[in-house]
Image: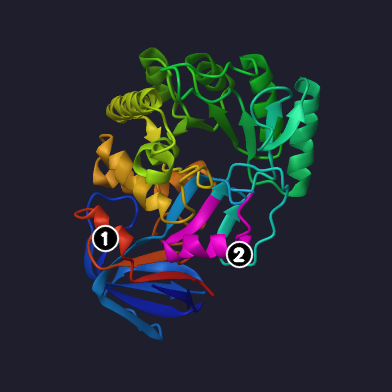
Amino acid sequence: MQIIKVPEEISIKYGQLWDGLSANVYNNGILSITNGFIKAINDHTSNVEPVLNFSHATLMPALIDTHIHLAFPYEDVQPLDQRAQQYLQAGVAAVRDAGSTCGKLSVNSSLLLLQSMGAIYKKGCYGSALGYPAENLSQALQLVDKLAKLGAKHIKIVASGIFSFKIFSKTGAATFSASELRSIVKRAAAYNLPVMAHASGDEAVRCCLEAGVSTIEHGYFMSRETLKRLAASGIYWAPTLSPVNAQLAKPELFSALSPAMREVITRSLQYHQELIAEGFALGARILAGTDAGAPGVLHGISLLEEIMLLQNSGLSPLAALQAATSKAALACQLSEAGSLMTGKKPYILVLKDNPLNNLRTLFSPEALLIPA
């Protein structure tokens, strides 16, 4: 696939264009770029030169992965620049990093990398591989200050443990109270930073909803009642199907599981997909986040697999695509990408087919256009 840097003045001819928002496509038009920004998306008279001809193809917004760990796996010596390149080659122009112990990540790439600079977790609880421990609320607030000053684009909080692969529906306990989380959200808001909250189990998800976090990450084994509250709240939800699916789909992981664990993981995935289907029907704002870097979840291409998993969980093709484009951009406070609209920058994926009709076309992109 080509990665093309788009000059500040150019016209791009297309056969079809999906803007990241609409249920339909535009046919046979011109997308014009002026001063480095999209001027028009359905222009038939543009005389801006030069002209890039994709009249045989479909344009759509470049993809966004809302939950990755670029530094994972730690034991892999693959350079971060190479991992970043894998995203671009998969048609992914932006990613939201959910934390590591590496602090600020240095990457020489055109990839838009939104960094947390490390997650905040309760000392003695799950999260030691993700960032910084806090013994109490005061320390957690100090960490928010520290991360904001380092240039974090969001605050990642670890509000629970993980769920068990051995006992169905068992999850790690909630680690911060709703009151503590509310204070953390308030401190982050002082820096205009959204809060992404790792939360599985009903208590942890409810505490996060009461605190007004920006996004719920994972959300495994919340109750139906809490799911209704999530949908009504307008808080985004990244259900991260990929790490659990990988345990069943990747032979090297599947072979290491006992028969009992295979059954638990299969039931857990099915239950989570049922929650996603119900959440979608209720109007929940669902995002595509892969947890890339987790075992079996590859950087880049896993986002395409996550989109397919969301569709298999009951989302329409339109909603599954929006989960990795326009809705993802809103959740990440990424104003320059996520849709093809006047005033946006040209982060554009070129496909051979209309993705609304054929999501599989995402797996064979023709080109990724990014600003020069």
Q: Secondary structure at mark 2?
A: helix
Q: Nearer the viewer, residue 178 or 99?
A: 99
x%, y% of residue 32? 38, 73
Any part of residue 344 in sight: no
Can you say whether 298 is above or below 200 in the image?
Answer: below
- Whether pointer 1 and pointer 2 mark residues with C-beta atoms closer than 8 Å, the reply is no
Secondary structure of the residue carrying numbered label 1: helix
Residue 122 relative to residue 196: left or right: right
Report which residue position mark 1 lands on.
361
**Is residue 331 or residue 10 the one in the foreground?**
331
Up/down of 329 relative to 52, above or below: above
Nearer to the camera, 283 or 168: 168
Q: Nearer the viewer, residue 36 or 148?
A: 148
Across and down, in percent, residue 172 comes to: 56, 19
Residue at figure coordinates x 50%, y 47% from the top left? 292
**Which stretch did the figure color magenta?**
75-95
Residue under the image location 33 percent in, 28 percent down: 266
Residue lying at 26% horizontally and 53% vertically, measured from the top left: 359
Confirm whether residue 36 shows in the render: yes
Measured Cα–Cα span from mark 1 to mark 2: 26 Å
Mark 2 lies on residue: 81
How many residues crowd around disc 2 within 10 Å: few (fewer than 14), some, or many (20 or more)? some
Residue at 27% across / 41% down in the picture? Answer: 311
- Quadrant of the image for the N terminus? bottom left
Name the disc covering residue 137, or none: none
Please tell me in which quadrant of the rendered image residue 42 appears. bottom left
Q: Which tag, 1 or 2, sits closer to the chain's start?
A: 2
Give coordinates of residue 318: x percent, y percent: 27, 46
The question of residue 77 being in magenta is answered with yes
List x then y, in percent, for residue 258.
Answer: 40, 28
